[in-house]
Amino acid sequence: MTKSLKTFAVLLALALLVPTGCAMGDDEIPDTPLVAGAVSAGADRSAAIGRDGSLWVWGRGSGAAPVRIGAEREWAFVSIGADSHVALALDGSLWRWAWGGAGIGYSLTRMGSHDWRHVSAGGQSIVGISLDGSLRELPGDARIGPDYNWAILSVGGVDQGGHVAGIRLDGTLWAWGRNMEGQLGDGSTTRRDTPTLVQPGATWRMVCAGWYHTMGIMSDGTLWAWGSNASGEFGDGTATSRQVPTPLQPGETWVSVSAGHRHTAAIRADGSLWTWGLNRRGQLGDGTTINRHTPFRIGGGTDWVSVAAGFDYTVAARSDGSIWAWGDNRDGRLGDGTTIDRLSPVMIVAGLVE
């Protein structure tokens, strides 16, 4: 492994596991893009990276409690989509896994011949950024565009024909793919097959593509939404969808956001966790199944460091390393050892991440 790759991998792992909202004030927001944290949620399975670089999975095909896989490697990042999943090892290699059955266990298969900077799994699509900054679709390793300046990306969770949003090293935001709900944010509902600039002149530090909507955080810590808002996914008090980025809760500073099926979860700079949108299976964690069109605070804690909104459920991590989950628990996707839906956060493991 080259020195530059090793340095990048270490920095990436630290970025994923260090609390993102603990010491970040209004004028401490970094200009560099952020990636999602140490937990990931998809349609019916979840995953987490442990503080020691271990990889844990649960849900469909894995069981109702976290199971460690790939113990021979240290892991930096994991991404679970609607129908795909992938993990980035600390050495820059990219892997997916499958359950081989009793007596066989999990098998991991390396994807692509490159070392990788970042990756995101969506429906049946996986898109990665090679160490040279180029954008590639997996499997197949096909290049997407001629540029070598990509920093992070997010693939939407739709089972077929989703959308992708990515941030370049200069902080500009680009999107492409399915756009029937305006989820690309380019002011239209026209499908784009190549990266299209979103909100010219703006600088972004995080983006998350959901099933039908997209959420982003600008470099000043403001939160923005676009696409479908039918269930209150934006948290702006309406059900009005937008085809361009719309600011939410002016005056608040956000450090992380996750767009799920039709709900959203986000962490403010003070470490508080908020949810809004569809709540039919308790995915908002407010003890009810009532939709919310404005943000609801999860408890009084200010120690949330990572959150992932999946298909009707949510997974989050606190600074003490504990992982919590709530919402739809079919296939054991919450990881609490049961298949019982939870309307409020339940701790599934202590001390796993940090």
Image (tube, rainbow, N blue to C red):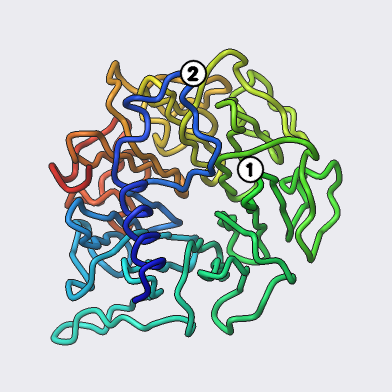
Q: Amino acid at mark 2?
A: Asp
Residues tagged 2 and 1 counted as in contact (Cβ below 8 A)? no
Viewport quadrant of the N terminus:
bottom left
Point out residue 292 in the picture as x, y percentages from the top left corner: 53, 23
**Gap between marks 2 and 1, in whole Å?**
23 Å
Residue carrying label 2: 26
- Is residue 8 positioned above or below 234 on the image? below
- Is residue 318 positioned above or below 44 on the image? above
Viewport quadrant of the C terminus:
top left
> For this rendering, which residue is in front, 20 or 80?
20
Point out residue 26 in the picture as x, y percentages from the top left corner: 49, 18
> For this rendering, which residue is in front, 80 or 29?
29
Point out residue 151 in the picture as x, y percentages from the top left corner: 57, 55
Instruction: Please indicate whether residue 11 sits to the left or right of residue 137 in the image.
Output: left
Residue carrying label 1: 214
| First in sequence: mark 2 vs mark 1 | 2
